[in-house]
Amino acid sequence: MKRIASIALAALLVLLTACGAEAPAAQGFKPALDTKTACSLNVAGHYSNFEALEEEFNRFAEHYPNVELTYTYLDNYNKIIATTLESSDAPDIFFTYPWMATSEDGAAVLAKAEDLADEALKIDLSCIREGMLYEDAQGKVPMVPIYTTTYGMMVNEDLFKKENLSIPTTYSELLDVCEKLKSAGYPSPMMGYNSFLIYPMYFPYFCSQIKDDPDAVKALNDMAPGAGEYARGALELVDDFMSHGYIDLEMCNALENDYQDVIMRFFEGDVPMMLASGNTVSGTEKRESQSEAFTANPFTYSFHPVPCSDEGGYFMNTVSMSFSVNSGSENLDMANEFMRFLVSTEELNRMAQSKRMVTPCADMSLDAIYASFGDAKVLYTASLGLADAPDSQMRKAGRQVSNGLLTVDEAVAAFGTLE
């Protein structure tokens, strides 16, 4: 366990005023506890650093100057958080994820979580976008989303302008653009991390096919015989796109991860479209200065839905990370108070923009890089009700078909048993 940020908030207030520009108090929030309360709170998570949260620590200090907040990075977070919550070093607030709601390991973690829907806490959950908030069978809300994400393609707008091309918004346009880029000398008009590859194209399409079919979702979740047929349309999309040769698999295989390598390769400036998730996009701004190629030849880039049909692409919105409060916290009242402060449109939008993530708020304030998603049809994975097992099988099927390891028929037949 590595302590990476320990902030004495009273001291920070002095520093802020010394800079000659006092930060304005958070609008709308009124303290419910004694503002002279002195205690400490610890937030534990898997981010190696969390500047956006530290900014919120500073803002909370405007109301509670004697509260010390720290952020702790936990190595191997998903495997150790359950035991950490049982230890003497248990955090007051901790990261949680959607998968925890459907797994035994996750259930042990959520069992330690405060019900944030408890009216006595007065946390304004109405600011969260419909479809983003998880409720358990008892109607309790053990976690509140802090960041959400989506899937799409980073586009080098300068290359498109150079080739006199428009960013595609339909599948037909995508094929046409890729053909023109290939003819213009780009060996791989589109790239992506291999195990992820064209997931941003086929998975939203797959979800769009089953979103209004509860029988399909149930069959997939139960891994019923023949459930793989529901994946056929999306896998045929994979097969069709890959058949055109617009993705060079050798170039994609050179990428060792879907974050640092994907970003730095995109910043080389010769890739028109790079498949990615919002989590990857969140790391772009910080890495602009780390890329010698981008520093020498900067270019304009943006993030777009991947067109998967002639109706366009989808804003596939899923929770990336949530916060939960440890119900056994020694400073439970203050931990809940911090959550009451944080769960607001103003604070959550600020956190999202600071990290270039997608806000969970109904009143969305998106970074300009996501502008094109404002016009896309929205799909919420939480509302879909698809379990982890069919999600995982769909990823494996798409990867094997896209790499030519299985035909569509073979992947459909093996769905549920794919390794």
Image (cartoon, rainbow, N blue to C red):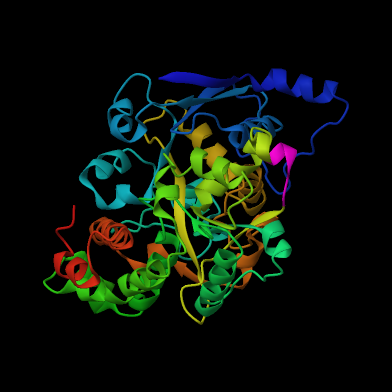
| Left or right position of 308 against 162 | left
Residue range corresponding to the magenta coloring: 294-299
Task: Find residue 227 and report its horizontal and vertical position in percent.
Answer: 18, 72
Name the residue located 72 percent from the left edge and 42 percent from the top edge. 26
Q: In this view, does 404 lie above or below 57?
A: below
Horizontally, is 103 left or right of 345 in the view? left
Q: Residue at x 83, y 24 (%)?
A: 17
Task: Let me know if residue 295 is in the magenta part.
Answer: yes
Residue at the image position 27 percent from the left and 75 percent from the top = 232
Q: How many marks?
A: 0
Place of residue 249 in the rendered image (x, y in percent of width and height, measured from the top left): 40, 53
* Of the pair 176 and 10, the residue shown nearer to us: 176
Q: In this view, does 195 lie to the left or right of 268?
A: left
Pick the residue in front: 54 or 162: 162
Q: Which residue sits furthest left?
A: 225
Is any part of residue 193 visible from this angle? no
Residue 10: image quadrant is: top right
Asked if residue 233 lies in the magenta stretch, the reply is no
Q: Name which residue lies at 29% across and 41% down.
A: 111
Residue 318 sits above or below residue 56 on the image: below
Residue 402 lies in what quarter of the image?
Answer: bottom left
Can the viewer see residue 12?
A: yes
Q: Where is residue 37 in the image (x, y as percent from the top left)?
A: 60, 24
Above or below residue 222? Residue 169 is below
Residue 218 figure quarter = bottom left
Residue 283 x/y as whole percent = 57, 41
